Image (cartoon, rainbow, N blue to C red):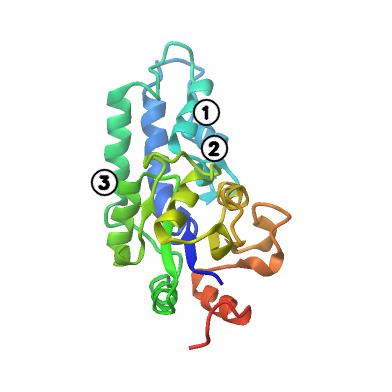
Amino acid sequence: MIRSLVFDKDGVILDMAGTWLPVARQVADYTVSRQPDGDNRLTRAELLAAVGVDDATGVIDPRGMFAAEPFARVRTTWQAMLPPGIIDLNQDQDYRNEVRRMAQEMAHGGVVAKGDVETPLRQLAAAGFRIAMLTNDSAESARRNMVELGIADLFAPIIGVDSGYGAKPDPDGLLHILDQHGSTPEQALMIGDTGADYGAAVNAAVAGFICISDDPNHRPHEEVPVENVIPQLAELPQLLIGRGVMAAV
């Protein structure tokens, strides 16, 4: 019997491009500005392309680093591209504080849901499922996003990359959630969109992984069954009903 449903945030609850593309562009612009003057300065488009964001089209690759990895990985990637002698993006506190300010300021009031997420989530909660969130964003940012959407009350707990359990695909955050729920891995499903989400599900040995993707060909691994791919959360209750996991309402 499935008791726990654990959700990723970006690309599942939130529309990735609608919420984070403006932030990505501004942070890349700021990073570019920290380079010394010269003929070989990297461009915003080059920095974004390296982490899976097409600046020209606004498309964020669901398999790319920006979509799937903690921002520390993005900083490390950009650091390797930038000229020697530039500030250490992971260590310079002024840089990190400014990036955090940009993200908070731009995302505040600009959170875009991936379709109707509240209706299916409340339907699932009413059916008795325990609902939680596991994200490679910070827990504070994730909670703030959920407050803006009016659904923070549904998630307990919200575990972020800074909560002390590592980053997905490490399974410790997922296992901690199940411990909090009093559930076993066999009683849980992970709902995500990236290889990090799928990896956490596999590493924690949960009962299954449901992928949110507009295109089944973009699912994070070929071992994810196509029938486990849905475009939006609005389809999740019916999927669970069809499999006998949830009673029809």
Is 213 positioned to the left or the right of 78 in the image? right
Q: Residue furthest right?
A: 222
Query: Which residue is more in the foreground, 15 or 242?
Result: 242
Which quadrant of the structure image shows residue 9?
bottom left
Q: Residues within 10 Å of mark 3 (few under 14, many from 20)?
A: few
Query: Which residue is more in the foreground, 101 or 6?
Result: 6
Q: In terms of sequence position, does the residue under pointer 3 or pointer 2 come before the other? A: 2
Quadrant containing the N terminus in the rendered view:
bottom right
Residue at left offset 38%, top offset 36%: 27
| Circle on res. 105 | 3
Can residue 212 be seen from the camera position used here? no
Q: In terms of sequence position, does the residue under pointer 3 or pointer 1 come before the other? A: 1
The vertical placement of 22 against 247, above or below, is above
Is 108 positioned to the left or the right of 89 in the image? left
Residue at left offset 65%, top offset 56%: 218
Amino acid bearing label 1 = Thr
The vertical placement of 110 against 22, above or below, is below
Give the alpha-carbon distance from disc 3 to disc 2, as whole Å. 22 Å
The vertical placement of 84 against 176, above or below, is above
Q: Tell me the residue that label 2 is attached to.
A: 51
| Circle on res. 77 | 1
| Circle on res. 150 | none
Q: Are marks 2 and 1 in contact (CB under 8 Å)?
A: yes
Give the alpha-carbon distance from disc 2 to disc 1, as whole Å. 8 Å
Point out residue 197 in the picture as x, y percentages from the top left corner. Answer: 55, 51
Point out residue 212 in the picture as x, y percentages from the top left corner. Answer: 56, 62
Amino acid bearing label 2 = Val
For mark 1, give the secondary structure: helix
Give the alpha-carbon distance from disc 3 to disc 1, as whole Å. 24 Å
